[in-house]
Image: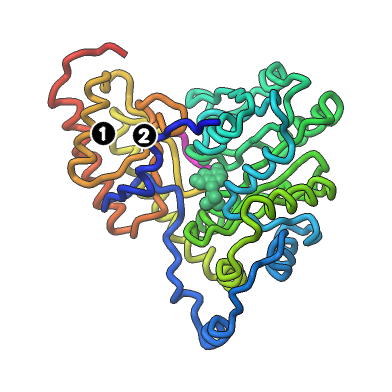
Amino acid sequence: MKFPINDIVTLLDERLEFNLAESTNKDLILNEIWDDEFSKELKNLKLEYGTSKGNKKLREKIGEKLNVDKNQIVITNGAVFGIFLSMLCLCENGDEVITVQPNFPPSMDLIEGLGFKRVLIKLSFEEEYQIDINKLFSLITNKTRLIILVSPLNPTGTIHSKEEILEISERLNNQYPNCKLIIDETYREATYGDNDVIKTYAGLRENIITISSLSKSYGTPGLRIGWLQSSDQKFVEQVGVAKTNTVISNSVLDEFVALKVLNKEFEILENRRIHSITGLELTKNWVEQNNELVNWTEPKAGALCCIKLNEKRFAKDNIEEFYSLSKAIGIQIANGEWFGEPKRYFRLGFGYLDTEKLDFTLNKLSEILIKATTNKVNSFEL
Ligand SMILES: Cc1ncc(COP(=O)(O)O)c(C=O)c1O
């Protein structure tokens, strides 16, 4: 078994100052949740093993959020581990997993990494990353054990409608009862300003597994706390066993902090939603100002979106020039290849930097767009 190499690892290992590549919201600093009680409880925290399904209070709290019983919840080391455990528990040698492309790379690469057959359904910029359900069903076989959809999607911030998800779930139930549907809702709560939070799919159908975490909307990716929810009790038990056999438990320290984060849920999210809407507005203006050079799909949630470098102005060389000029001045860009797209597309994260820095970085990026299209235009092979 081999995991495909993906350059997205640079996002962890080579952080540049003007980071437009991040998908998370403003980092949470411990000070935001620190008070006397926190300090007292932390001092007395026993660093014992956690439980196989995770801290009971944390599962209750997440159950309340999703309006399901805590017995449907397993705490995972980030959302990514929920996807890993699902695949591990549902698939055998020779089984197939379908997911969308573009996508968060581990969702695509874990499939091959774990030795299963990966089947990708391509979503396109031109179709605003919407899914063709009949095309999806044409890819399903009797060996398909899992379909992973992501809503809101990384890198685009686009969503699937409730009608679409219910139709897929219903048709699977009728035609492929051995195939489950993961809805990765990691960006569900990362809405903008006063926009309504996207409703969870938790508890809606037995063949739907929902996955999420505190990483994006709360700005705590370093906490490594996520969760998996399913109303199929046998599957939940299996996941608990698989978790014990791989990592034993979550870190009790992470779980303690996660509870404190959720106790201040309202303030933390409100603060980040205000920050995101400002970032979104700045990005919108930037796209409008540069509309001869770039185009975008406006996101519905998640502090990220997909930008396309205009075909008429960016040939292969110009695209390379764009990335190299950005890197040279410390602007980090998430190039489309990370997500299974051509380099003509890139993900722009507008929730991570402080507003002033985001504004500054976008202005610099406008200069780079112009330079990259005027410096040298050698070939227009596409
Ligand atoms: C769609 C999606 N799912 C899951 C994850 C993993 O998040 P976590 O930090 O909770 O493991 C990411 C991270 O980028 C993501 O974009």
**In magenta stretch: residue 312:** no
Q: Is residue 257 above or below residue 222?
A: below
Residue 254 x, y percent position in the rendering: 56, 66
Q: Main secondary structure of the magenta part?
A: loop
Residue nearest the observer in this picture, 6 or 325: 6
What kind of residue is marked 2? Asn
User: In the figure, residue 89 lies in which quadrant?
Assistant: top right
Question: If the image is split into quadrants, where does the N terminus sit?
Answer: top right
**Residue at 52% across / 34% down in the picture?**
103
Q: Is residue 343 left or right of residue 194?
A: left
Q: Is residue 310 above or below residue 155?
A: above
Circle 2/circle 1 CB separation < 8 Å: yes
Q: Badge 2: few (under 14), some or many (20 or more) residues near its Cα, within 10 Å? A: many
Residue 345 x, y percent position in the rendering: 38, 29
Residue nearest the observer in this picture, 362 or 264: 264
Identify the residue under disc 2. Answer: 335
**Residue at 27% across / 22% down in the picture?**
314
What kind of residue is marked 1? Tyr
Q: Is residue 298 left or right of residue 55?
A: left
Question: If the image is split into quadrants, where does the C terminus sit?
Answer: top left
Q: Is residue 375 left or right of residue 214?
A: left
Residue 371 x, y percent position in the rendering: 16, 32
Colouring mode (rainbow / by chain / secondary structure / one colour): rainbow
Q: CA distance from mark 2 to mark 1?
A: 8 Å
Residue 31 x, y percent position in the rendering: 44, 76
Q: Is residue 284 visible?
A: no
Question: The magenta stretch spans which residues?
Answer: 297-301
Q: Is residue 266 above or below residue 208?
A: below
Identify the residue under disc 1. Answer: 323
Q: Is residue 276 left or right of residue 365?
A: right
